[in-house]
Amino acid sequence: MDSEYSPESSSPVLLLCAALAVSLLGPLRAAAQNLPQPVAVASCEEACGISLDLEMEYGDDSGPGMLDLVGWVKAYRDASGRTYLVGEPIDNVLVFDSDGSFRRRFGSSGSGPGELKDGSSLVVTGDGELSVLDRGRGVILNFDHTGRLRSEVKTVGWVPHGTRTFAWDGPQVIHVANLATRDRIGFPLHLVNVETGEIERSFGSTTGEHELGGNPGLHPVAVRQDQRIWMAVGFERYDIALWDMNRPHRFLRHEASWFPEQTRGDLTHGGMDKPPQPFIYALALSESDSLLWVAASVADEEWRKADLYSGDDDNYYDDILEVIDLRTNRVIASQRFDHSFHLVEAGLLGRLAITTNGSVRYQTFRARFEAATGR
């Protein structure tokens, strides 16, 4: 039965609670009403193919430069062109010069000072300086390019259970994880000082909600020169947002045929007996911040039921690489690749390859725009 609100019958406590609710909800509603509307991204129509040119091979047939990395591998570069290769979990780092020659390997597995128990991510924080987040020990280890341990700090007030960290500027990095802040509000993005181990600020939300869709640890970001951040918003659709701490400035939405809009039910009722749902796994910006490179995993065109955790996922996933011109909101290049490739940085892809004699190499490829065929 409906009842009419009567101020006379309300207690002072209820009135105070109502006033507080209005005072709190007002700004949140205003913020929600002032959110920028998604901008539709147009597909490319003519010359929008991407071809790959081999740039460099890393690794030796024997000795300390021999690659023993298997499965997930990631490459990082510093301002001098050095390349750092790590596997997952990170327990050692291989360093190569800009000409591809092996320089050194450093890091060791263990639970003692300076050792890596469950290294989950690496960040190049300066020219020849890098930091490794170790979830197992709850520490951040800071190295120079020679492998010398500069410092080791405990994470202060937070547990590093997220798996992705991205460079910001100098000693500050962006950590992507579902971590509770001091006021118990969860946010997906955290500004971490690798010299102190402290979270300096948590952000990426307008109203305090921490779940943007899917796993917050898998929301890739790309940091602009003005320190604004592009972030893939969720798994349900091809959505990318530009953030300035807690304030969104721009939303991009691409209605691609290979990325149909999904529901939470689609995501939770999957399984190895069904084709995997698409998701964006990497973002990268060109030096001018005008081109946004987007890498997404989709079901293999010849998908078959497979055990993804067996390590043989070539028949499970394909990758689609797209380049968005942020000045025109148009995809200017798009190409489907075998899942063995991954996005290293804007315009650069990498993969592991096996030579004829059975040794492992890490290869990088420069992307080049060309006229598409068969579209």
Image (tube, rainbow, N blue to C red):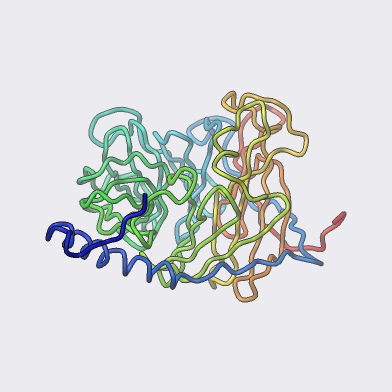
Given residues 362 and 207, the one toward you in this image is: 207
From the viewer's perspective, is residue 368 above or below residue 272? below
Image position of 164 (left or right of 14): right
Residue positioned 56% across, 67% down in the render: 38
In the displayed orientation, state which residue is furthest to the right: 374
Is residue 310 placed above or below 282 in the rendered structure?
Answer: above
Seen in the image, is 354 located left or right of residue 48? left
Q: Is residue 275 visible?
A: yes
Q: Which picture quadrant has residue 269?
A: top right
Residue at the extreme bottom of the image, as rendered:
327
Left or right: residue 340 compared with residue 196: right
Percent of width and height locating residue 298: 66, 43
Q: What residue is drawn where x is 57% and y is 65%?
A: 252
**Residue at horizontal 66%, vertical 40%?**
339
In the displayed structure, would residue 97 be above or below residue 355?
below
Find residue 306 and report its image quarter: top right
Name which residue lies at 48% across and 33% down: 64
Residue 280: where, in percent of width, then height? 58, 50
Residue 53 in the image: state x and y as whole percent.
71, 54
Q: Quadrant of residue 375?
A: bottom right
Viewer-proximal residue, 321 or 358? Answer: 321
Closest to the observer: 6 or 294?
A: 6
Residue 239 position in % (x across, y down): 56, 58
